[in-house]
Image: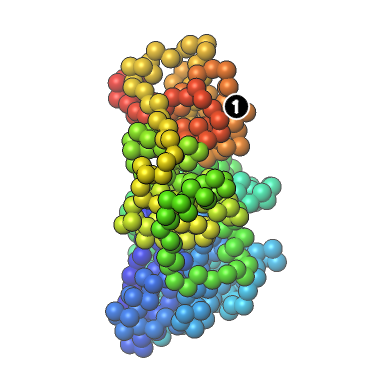
Amino acid sequence: MFFQHIFDRSLAQSSYIVGCQATGAAIVIDAKRDIDVYLEIAGQNDLRITHITETHIHADFLCGSRELAAVTGAAMYLSDEGGEAWQYGFPHQGLKDGDVIKVGNLALKVMHTPGHTPESISFLLTDMPATDRPVMVFTGDFVFVGDVGRPDLLEKAAGLIGTKETGARQLFQSLKKFSDLPEYVQVWSAHGAGSACGKALGAVHSSTVGYEKIRNWAFQFGESEAGFTEALLTGQPEPPAYFAMMKQLNKINRPLLIEVPQHPKLSAGQFIAAYKKGIKVIDTRNKADFARGFIPGSLNVQGNNSFSTWCGWLLNYQEQFMLIADDHQMGDLTRKLMRIGLDNLYGYISNIDDLGIELQIADTISLDTFKTYIGKADVQIVDVRGVTEYDAGHVEGADHVFVGTLPDNLDKISKEKLVVVHCQAGDRSAIAYSILARSGFKNIKNFSGGMKEWLDADYR
């Protein structure tokens, strides 16, 4: 048996290629949209991708199953569980609980494991030439290392009111099915630490059924469904705004993107003309470089592992946008954007000094200066971290507006007072500062040290 785990750090997303070395057949599970990695792995290991499958209709990334099927001709095997509202809207081989996918001498048995979503399935893998016992289970967003999939995304991200309690009850029953598996079976999920698909995902990529039963918080409630439900629904992070679009695009027919696109580098004239037309500018430079001089109206979304998530919060799927980025970054940033379907990139520039545009300077302040603003009536301190972070501890008197929802909550920001934004360590407050500056706020400052510096100085 051949097995390889592929991990995308930008979305903390896992996919897998499993192959039968005797026959050369292989299956890809939960493919990301830039499919060249699977083709390369298969080619290097004398495998043919003959089967493609998904654990559920994903919300956090645009699944590449259809791109991969278009290139390889492999059949797609997708869940037909969950009821009429949860069916894929394009041709596929339907899967039900108990079905078996044969990939050469390998067998993947389907387990319907609803809760995170109604159609969610897991795959119990048996390497038949070696043993008749299962060796791995691919759980998707059902069971993670140290956590379980949240059932509230359908309600919070997709607007399906009243589904989270039903999902929690379903998940509680699905966990009983998981608990009946042999304890030695390896657990491989679709996400790790850093994903918004749960609240306590572990940084280790794999576990076992036995270890999860003794270590994962979700297995510690015995028969108390009410206790489990309360714990499950409490403290979940804010689901990014783009999740609703991913749910839709992963379910219906859509245009395919077979290759990673090459976006044009714009001349100064092209950029200025587009800028004057109102095309949004995303500045991917380091927050310190941005603060020293930025194009008015641009948004500072640093080109790190969180780049796609924040772009998903701040961009919609109809508008064009431009990037400020170094040439060597563009391949990586393009992949991060295409993984969530943000394909309307007009182009990019690298140098903003010769555009003839007067740059603005961000007003960043030190801890000592920040302390002088605490408790002042003419100052509004705005904590832009997540609600669970804020509830766990915040500067006295600080208002809370999560940075991802800030564009929709500008009415909560004072136009009369000095506004000071902060987050945990400065990345999110840099985004917030740029949002406010773009929105016309003039009297704003950024305490870039954030709660980390505040707490390190032993302030409470």
The type of colouring in the image is rainbow
Please name the residue shown 48% across and 11% down the image. 376
Tell me the quarter of the picture where residue 43 sits: bottom left
Name the spot of residue 214 as percent of width and height, x first.
38, 50
376 and 261: which one is in front?
261
Disc tally is: 1
Query: Which residue is pictured at 52% across the width and 50% down the height?
Result: 273
Q: Is residue 403 above or below residue 139?
A: above
Identified at 51% across, 79% down, the residue is 70
Horizontal placement of 286 versus 320: left or right? left
For the residue marked with disc 1, what is the amino acid?
A: Lys
Q: Quadrant of the C terminus?
A: top left
Q: Position of residue 272 (x, y in %)?
A: 48, 48
Q: Residues within 10 Å of mark 1 (few under 14, many from 20)?
A: few
Query: Residue 446 is drawn in which quadrant?
Result: top left
Compared with 260, 20 (above or below) is: below
Q: What residue is at 47 percent from the left and 41 percent from the top?
A: 299
- Location of the N terminus (image quadrant): bottom left
Query: SS for tag 1?
Result: helix
Query: Where does residue 51 sit, x and y in percent of width and height?
Result: 47, 79
Residue 108 percent across, percent down from the top left: 46, 75
Residue at the disc numbered 1: 412
Question: Quick one: 32 or 203, which is closer to the camera?
Answer: 32
Residue 432 can be seen in this image: no
Comparing 300 with 460, the one in front is 300
Residue closest to the far bottom: 23
Residue 320 relative to residue 212: left or right: right
- Residue 294 visible within the image: yes
Q: Is residue 339 above or below residue 389?
A: below
